[in-house]
Amino acid sequence: MYSPIVQSQLMAFHNLIRLDEENQILREKRDQLLERLQRGLRRDFMAKGKVPPSFSTLNQGSYAMNTGITPADGEFDIDVGVVFEISRRDFPDPVVVKAWVRDALAGPNTKITIRNSCVTVSYVKNGNPYYHVDIAVFCPSSNGEQMYIGKGRENSLEKSRNWEPADPKGLIKLINGHRKGDEAAQFRRVIRYLKSWRDETFKKTGNAAPVGIGLTVAAYHWFQPQTRTVEKTQQFDDLATLRALVKQMLDRFSDGFLGLWEYRLRVALPVAPKTDVFARMSLKQMKDLETELKTLLASLSRAGAEVDPVAACEILRTVFGQRFPIPKPSTTGKRLAAPSVMPTSYS
Amino acid sequence: MSRILTLSSGGRLKITDTAWVKMVSLRQDTLRKKEAGGLLLGRQILESDDLVIDDVSTPVRGDTRARMRFVRSKRHQRFVDEAWAKSNGTRVYLGEWHTHPEGVPSPSSEDLRSWRKHLSDKQIHGEALFFVIVGVDAVRVWEGFRFQRSVNLIGEVCLHGQESD
């Protein structure tokens, strides 16, 4: 049942966790990194008597899609795309290009890993993870109309090192243009709730967490806004909306043939290359994801059935973590101007 | 175990574990146990028709307690005053409860007389009042209507594991 009090606690929580588009720290860190990349490339290429490649940048990920949350544990992650002005023909192996990025950024307190879809640069402060940057490496087609993302790791076989067609700008445009007005705002809130559930849940179990873009794309496909009319005004019911989305995700786990019969949740990227955003999750990780989604659904149902909004918020705190605000009971009741005066009672 | 009953308004009434355990632990399940009772305290939830009974008072010195009779003294007033003061006026008197030495309890004529008196008492504030009788096998809850001075059975919770309304 809809509770205006629970809804306002969810909205307050959302304001607490939302990563502001104008976040100064992130912007500074990203700009510093891009400067270091430029300096490092110049240094490395000049040393070999070569001209350093020029690149442009793409704002990527949750930052660009306005779906980011501030991390509960303090480790920020930043996504950035780097588009090298090179030809795929000259550099058929994207891992070579990714290694340029890795070498250019090497430095103290920095750990750099070439991953399948990006180069991850992690910074440590006083021995603790501070923040990390995922750099996706792109190159354009010769006519500039198509973009390719560099896939593959250093130990990948040749057939797994590819420039894959990608449409990073198209995805951002789709997500940013999805729904209008208040519905678009609820769409973003629901994505952020899912991400905070993900952070809270998978931190506890230590299992591999579903990628944020996967949750975002799932919401893109299956989000259906739910509203309630209270005293002739329309109110958005975030709890019911999130619950319905989680239900949809669970309903879409299915057996599918992909070389082998596999029971998975398939979430297709709505732009090129239209691949499954969860394709890299193992079957074990898929099973964990399903189990956790079932637990989430049960908790959301229990919170929705609660009469006492304080108890409902206590349940939601177990889902979303310590940052979820629980109202004081005295703020949830109607006020009486004076206490009742009792007669004696006979029975 | 949560106890949620549906009200005539379409709203819901929840009795929390704290309130429940205090009442049920005093049920007259042996021949020697005397009647017990007290007040119901709780919140009318803002922007809704829902109510939560989250505490009850239990017998104090001054109450009359017998096998078949309980007279709640006015000393219970301090529970109402304290709850009201500590909660910024939001935890309020919501009704009465007492025990009966019978399986599935029904109100006696004395009970009904007393309930009606409460319903018309202008010194008792609030729209809704509830009356709970804790039997040996079941607890029953009545919703009181202040204007009509009538009561309506809204729920019965079995004390042997099963719940029903």
Image (tube, rainbow, N blue to C red):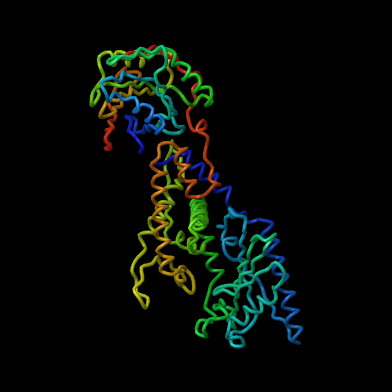
A258 lies left or right of A78: left
Q: Position of residue A137 (x, y in %)?
A: 60, 75
Seen at 49% across and 57% down, the residue is A198
A261 lies left or right of A220: left
Q: Quadrant of the N terminus of chain B?
A: top left
Quadrant of the rendered structure where residue A163 is?
Answer: bottom right
- Judging depth in this view, the residue of B134 and A339 nearest the camera is B134
Q: Quadrant of the C terminus of chain B?
A: top left
Q: Is residue B126 above or below residue A34?
A: above
- Judging depth in this view, the residue of A10 and A201 nearest the camera is A201
**Residue reaching furthest left?**
B103
- Judging depth in this view, the residue of A333 and A228 nearest the camera is A333
Q: Is residue A180 above or below residue A5?
A: below
- Judging depth in this view, the residue of A96 and B160 nearest the camera is B160
Quadrant of the rendered structure where residue A78 is?
Answer: bottom right
Can residue A184 be seen in the rendering of this structure? no
Seen at 70% across and 59% down, the residue is A126
Q: Position of residue A332 (x, y in %)?
A: 49, 33
- Badge count: 0
